[in-house]
Amino acid sequence: MTTDLQRDLEDIVRVSRELGGDPSLVLHGGGNTSIKTVGVDVTGAPVDLVLVKGSGWDLGTIEAPGFAPLRRDRLAELLTLAELDDVTMVNELRQASLDAAAPTASIEALLHAYLPGKAVLHSHANAIVTLTNSGFSDADLVAVLGERVLVLPYVMPGFPLARLVADSDVSGVDAVVLRNHGLFTFADDADAALARHRELVALAEAHLGVDSWGEPGELTPASGTAVELATLRRDVSRAAGAPMLVRQTRSARGAEFAARPEAAELTSRGTATPEHVIHTKRTPMVGRDVEAYAATYREYFARNAARATADVSELHPAPRVVLDPELGLLVTGATTKDLKVAGDVALHTLDVIDAADAVGTYGSISEAESFDIEYWSLEQAKLSGKKTKPLGGEVAIVTGAASGIGKAIAELLLAQGAAVVGIDLNPEVATLSDSDSWRGVTGDVSAPEIIDAAMETAVREFGGVDIVVVAAGIFPPSQVLAELDDEVWDRAFRVNVTAVARLFRAVHPVLSLAPNGGRVVLVSTKNVAAPGPGVAAYSASKTAAAQLARVAALEWAADGIRVNQVEPDAVFDTAIWTPELLAARAANYGLSVEEYRTRNLLRTEVRSVTVAEAVVAFCEQFPATTGAHLSVDGGNDRVI
């Protein structure tokens, strides 16, 4: 890599991160950037290049490998064509790359290559979009932003947009404003292009009297019941044909907008920018009638399907954004990332609508044009490439989640795509994972208020509960019956049985609404079948819990809830098994520590993750199994 190319690449990475780090300019993968430079091909010959942001990279976090090095002469040749379909254009962009391993360049690569100036920056700046969505004339926009701005009508991104700009006079301007779309600035220096971008956005914000976008406002008090939210999630999931998460944002800003009588009319005018339709659909659902919303969406698809340039399959008709006068602003999605994106886009859109209506009349692109973006072949290709994890869209509560078996279960559920609420006395449960799919509740699982807090968290943050795993339990110190302490006995039953009964009672109304049917797994013990001396409190309490689970299996089958048990033994990678205790117990049997770890029929070590795999198997598979007991102990002759 030449020194000049390296320097140019470093400049565009730095400036792109500055641009992408401002959510009022770029939201969740929007926008694109480029810089023109000179590289060297395999023969050593110099090659004029344009380094264009790669598709799928986020400007806020982009790194050097996120830019595709494209041959400018080939892109110039492509722009002489009168027409170029999307599939062919993408293929040509890949072939124009100096590096076959580089990402596919942004769909706007031809436009970046054509525009004058070394560096080109494109954003969907809220202030610019608001101005162009307010009904202002081109002259009005130039009056606000200055003479060095070219204003162009909305056209589809990609080749049509590049062709439109190429057919326009860009001499004497250093910015292009695209109606209903966004802003391009260009200069012979990346920092100058960014400064110009910020200058134009500041002029727009000053005219609008707005400089804050997408703020959620204060956190509103929880509204609606757990059953109401879980019912909404069930209905959304049915319409989507798969489990969906639902998040009640509790945004004061969202709640205020949702309570307006005119909310449906205001939001019926479309998204702030065309690309947002991918994240939020063209309109939100106002109220909770999912069936009616889905029917309306199907009618929209039927009206516009003939516009598609290739065969398309109807996307699921469930809403991605919900505005309800009582519940406020809610968002839905298959993953928590989907929830985050939809929530941010929704809040920014509400501000754009209000700001546009304050100076004019808000209006987006037409329904037909929105359909063209939503069912664009390039977007369809992205969707078809997305992989769904086995427990995607599902919600689990795991007790005892901060260590040992409970931690292994929680981590595996997260890895399989579930959103998880963990409960544990250990405050480390709050930071077990930095994923937005994780929430930790610190406290004693036998305390009703802790169970209530976990339920509230699962329902408000993720929409409901699909899976409950009881892994919390205590193993009291060994005491023979003749010396049994009342407090030891009572505490064992309080944690190992009563807490389970309270959790079952609290979760049932929501669990019965799980889109794929509820699942409960009790982490039991081999002591139920084969107790030992000195562990009366543990064996009796765990046996009582096992009976409780059997009763739940009987009572809840009619609700489609499966209740099964996993019975581990000799799991030594847990907190209670210190190296000293292991050595002492092994010596007591005349064994080495390794021999003691594998003292089962299969001579295999049973680890926490081994138990977790059995638990998660009950959650993912066996749809016709309930009331089952699965030993995970390497084979115990006393149990067998």
Image (cartoon, helix red, strand yellow):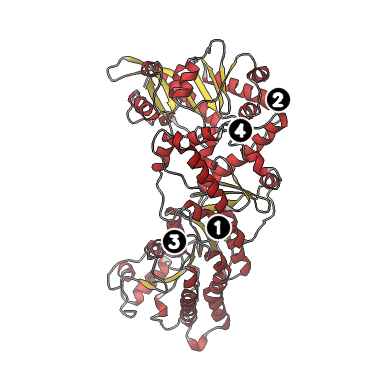
- Dividing the picture into quadrants, the one containing residue 462 is bottom right
**Sequence-wise, which precedes: disc 4 or disc 2?**
4
User: Is the residue 621 above or below the residue 37 in the image?
Assistant: below
Q: Mark 1 points at which residue?
A: 440
How far, Cα to Cα, is label 2 from label 3?
A: 54 Å
**Sequence-wise, which precedes: disc 3 or disc 4?**
4
Query: Residue 151 at what x, y percent from top left?
Result: 58, 19
- Dots 2 and 3: beta carbons under 8 Å? no
Q: Which of 178 and 235 is in front in this view?
A: 235
Q: Which residue is drawn at 49% across and 34% down?
A: 373
Query: Residue 83 at what x, y percent from top left?
Result: 40, 21
From the image, state whether disc 3 or disc 4 is nearer to you: 4
Looking at numbered disc 1 in the image, what kind of residue is underneath it? Answer: Gly
Q: Mark 4 points at which residue?
A: 24
Label 3: which secondary element: helix
How far, Cα to Cα, is label 4 from label 1?
A: 31 Å
**Sequence-wise, which precedes: disc 2 or disc 3?**
2
- Dots 3 and 1: beta carbons under 8 Å? no
- Dots 4 and 2: beta carbons under 8 Å? no
Q: Nearer the viewer, residue 398 or 154?
A: 154
Query: Residue 393 at what x, y percent from top left?
Result: 48, 53
User: Is the residue 453 above or below the residue 355 in the image?
Assistant: below
From the image, state whether disc 4 or disc 1 is nearer to you: 4
- Dividing the picture into quadrants, the one containing residue 391 is bottom left
Looking at numbered disc 2 in the image, what kind of residue is underneath it? Answer: His
The disc placed on residue 409 is: 3
Q: Mark 2 points at which residue?
A: 207
Looking at numbered disc 4 in the image, what kind of residue is underneath it? Answer: Ser
Q: Residue furthest bottom?
A: 482
The disc placed on residue 598 is: none
